[in-house]
Amino acid sequence: MSNVQKLILFLYLIDIGIISFISSTNGFSMRMVPINSHHLKIVPEKFTTYERLQFFNNITMSRMYNRRKHLFPDGIKSPLSLVQNTVFVTELHLGEGDTAYSPYVNLDTGSEVTWVQCEGCDPCFELDKSFAYKKSTSFTRVSIYDEMCSPPESYDGSCGFSLLYGDMEPHLEAEGLIGRETFYFENSRTNNMDAYQGLVFGCTLKSKYAYFGSKDMHENVVAGIFGLTGNPRSLLTQLDAQTHGRFFYCIPHVTDVTFIESTIYFGDDAQITGDATRQVQTIPMQSGIHYYLPLSGISVNKKRLPIDPSIFEYVEGDYTKGFLIDSGSAFSALPKSAYNLLRQAIVKFFRDAYGWLPRRPGLVFDLCYAIYPHYDQNLFPNVILHFLSNDQVGEIDMVLTKEHLFTEVENSHGEEQGFCMMILAGDDPGQTLLGSFQQVNFGFLYDVHNNRLSFVPQNCLENIS
């Protein structure tokens, strides 16, 4: 074969995707699948809106209280009593040949280690198929002396891990081997799956209270957790040459049963753009076990609430405080003293504007009304979150409108139309969460290397590929 023929063949193999160069990719994407997606079969299709909101409420409360030594507050119960869950899952692809494994895993910005349940586990959680790591020719154990074995923990003669998700009873516990395996991620430019060899992950062989589906249902397709923190063992960091510590997502909506899955982009694919009417704004971000933001105050219709800003401050090492952005939580949550002031302002707005008074609180949300006006959203109040800017001079504002604050609901019998505010009250002091419902139709770019978060109002349906 001549050199010209070899070149033609080489270019042809690249064109059809047999050969790809990861070094020139510097970016990839993953699916963001809503936990209430029908094909996951985790949330029953027969659920009323009320029951569906209960389900999402429990996810938020479990994440908000996952470092507190008590159970949910009275009344926070659901037909699905989830111990550990998130709003989104994604599909992993690992292993080669006959042992190739493509499970769904929770997409979690509050977890470091990516792990899946492996064959031979005892005890195990409900799962149709676990990863056959012993049969995988591309799997290797990580030595206790490997630099990625940090903290140095032993399991069955090699590096291991043990994770405790909160100190609430009952809490999810997972332990097992730390191994290396080949992972595949989708190249957004070519739509091919690029291979990344030798990535460190957790192979769970013992688990406790891991209800990724539910206690009442026997179908579960969620096999573990995909951690998205900036810590050394996260795949975000291990793939730093491709991710550059950057990822971007845009959520179209959360609780709607017709929710369309979206995409999370990494590296050079993680881009954020604005225009004359949609300005990209950037605020400082403290990364660690969570992503903390410098919330300095809250306004309702441009009137600042008299909230002590110290209740939002992040204290290093104290994971029960601070304001964090959490795509895994369905709704935002505020310490009770801040929530009460927000609630009073919203109640005053509807009373003064329309003469409406709140109805008796339900089991899920505290502020509800027995009417749902299909009016222009400008007739609803706006809530403005104020953040300290990068230069600590002035503030950056995030404006939450009707679609971020309220949703139509009915009671547990599917009757009595109305609407509720989708923000929860927590302990005071306590963690403050910016949940997915309040992130809808914003594009978010996480820049972990530079400790900053950029956001812009955006029609996220345009982000659906």
Image: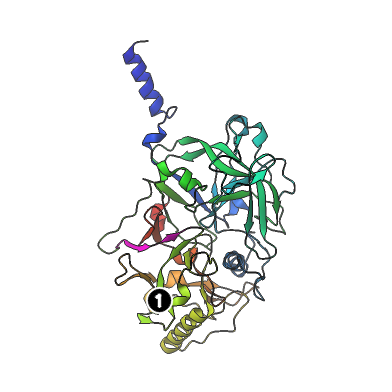
Extreme left residue here? 276
Most common secondary structure along the magenta stretch: strand
**Left of 216 or right of it: where is 41?**
left
**Residue 390 on image: x %, y %:** 32, 64
Q: Which residue is found at the position 29% from the left and 71% from the top? A: 393
223 and 284: which is toward the camera: 284
Picture coordinates of residue 385 (x, y %)?
40, 72
Circle 1 Cα neighbour tier, 10 Å, few/some/many (<14 / 14–19 / ≥20): many
> Viewer-proximal residue, 23 or 459?
23
| Amino acid residing under circle 1 | Gly
State the count of labels: 1
* Left or right: 448 as drawn, with respect to 145: left
Q: Is residue 91 magenta-colored? A: no
Name the image colouring. Answer: rainbow
Magenta span of residues = 279-288
Examine the rendering and report whether any part of residue 10 can be seen: yes
Dividing the picture into quarters, in which one does residue 428 lie? bottom right
Q: Outermost residue, top direction?
A: 1
Quarter of the image for residue 72 reads bottom right
Q: Would residue 284 be counted in the magenta stretch?
A: yes
Residue pushed farthest front?
145
Residue 135 at what x, y percent from top left?
Answer: 66, 32
Q: Which residue is mark 1?
A: 297
Identify whether 1 is placed above or below 198: above
Q: Front-most of 120 and 348?
A: 120
Of 46 and 380, nearer the camera is 380
Residue 117 in the image, given as x and y percentages of width and height: 65, 45
User: Measured along the vertical axis of the image, is residue 20 above or below residue 327?
Assistant: above
In the picture, measured across the screen, residue 45 lies left or right of residue 302, that is right
